[in-house]
Image (spheres, rainbow, N blue to C red):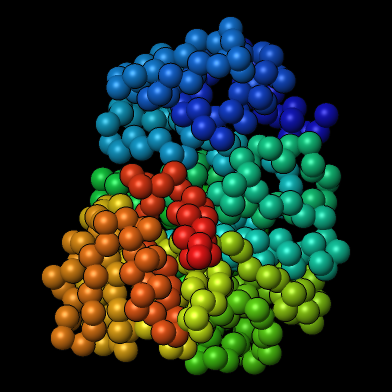
Amino acid sequence: MSLFFDRLKEFFKGRNVLILGFGREGRSTLRLLKRFGNCDITIADRNDVTSPETEGIDVIYGENYLGCLGRFDVIMKAPGIALFDRIPEDVKERITSQTDLLLRYCPNDITGITGTKGKSTTSSLTYHILHNCGKDAVLIGNIGIPPLDCIDELNDDTIIVCEMSCHQLEYVKASPHTAVYLNLFEEHLDHYSDFAAYRRAKENIYRYQTSADTLIVNKSLAPQIPAEVLTASLTEDADICVKGNEVYIKGEKIDIKTKLLGRHNLYNVAIAVSIAEQYGCKRSDALKAAASFEGLKHRLESVAVINGAEYINDSISTCPSTAIAAVMAFPEVDTIIIGGMDRGIDYTELTDFINGSDIANVILLPDSGHKIEKDLDHSKRSIYRAANLPDAVARAKAVTRKRCILSPAAASYGFYKNFEERGEHFRELVRES
């Protein structure tokens, strides 16, 4: 077995371990702990997750499932569990996660990528470039692959590209060798006590870096730390910057060819190319690889053209800035569908943008869409209040002449399991005759 495997096995040896949250990552943790076979395991979840795979393991569930935390030596927290400030400090010290253990014990080079938006595209693109430049690389993390699932794939020279959400970073005690902090907007306020707490979780991406490490960071967020810092910006001069539609890396103009739309994606590509250069890839090879990247589902994805009107699936959009970027990425957007879970986010930026735009039709979904109706200028456009997504798509088909974008600027929870399910439903509805 690998050094990483041995280090993790030693970490858990003889300890009383709680798997807190039994979704995808919790199940991954259970599989690994069973392989170690050297610790006591308990599972806690709001729901009863008893199943054949939990046979012989204590399961704690119900509304008060968090009341058991003080009983365990190690708490393996899944990303989806929100603890806020409800637990004492001595319990917080026992909380870890797959991301934390990856950063603390894996000897491989790790590139961690976070940001409110763009982290999935940048992570996938970085992996794509490294792979196409002949590097041994794996892609894990918030992209949908639990970090410790890679344990059997690692060779000594494998580069790990890990998309890191705020939830995965919240309790880490180490930072990646190459950290990437793309941007910061209001988001996930249902999970944190306030915006400052959300920001602190993000900042763990670089908090523990040393002079041997590198941070690529949005210039507006750049800290004073021992690591080498490369700044990035969409609005001003920086080590990596986008001016209009021109891209510069360390003062040199770069010709980027990409299938991805929007200036924000020029920013993402430039950063991915810069990461690849950190690992010895030639810039020309990295740019060639970037040009072949197809993009990801539910991110500015063209679904169909019906009666001359194009329908775009941007279900990944969960905050105002991404909806704005979606509209700016396409010409002649005459319909936008907005709304989803209301998490208390300020939508002023988005409503001001719509009010100053040429968008003819705004279709509002509950709950956040209905909430912003009063802030939209009804004199310049038609505003429709939809009951649900089928209602919204039916209305869009009736009024769209050029291009309709689903860019909700809101989370899907409470209506769909995740943004993927929402995007799949949109596709199905659009393609129905």
Question: Residue 168, can we see it?
Answer: yes
| Identity of the residue drawn at 22% across and 74% down | 383
Rendering coords of residue 140 (x, y %): 65, 48
In the displayed structure, does residue 154 sit left or right of residue 426? right
Q: Is residue 326 above or below residue 4?
A: below
Q: Give the residue drawn at x 46%, y 26%.
A: 20
Q: Left or right? Give the position of 367 relative to 223.
A: left
Considering depth in this image, is 375 or 361 the residue closer to the camera? 361
Which residue is farthest top? Answer: 56
Residue name at image x 83 percent, y 46 percent: 156
Tell me where residue 279 sits by quadrant: bottom right
Task: Tell how many labels.
Answer: 0
State the image coordinates of residue 343 (x, y, percent, origin top left).
Answer: 27, 52
Q: Viewer-proximal residue, 417 or 11?
A: 417
Quadrant location of residue 346?
bottom left
In percent of width and height, residue 186 lies at 32, 61
Residue drawn 28% across the image and 36% down it: 85
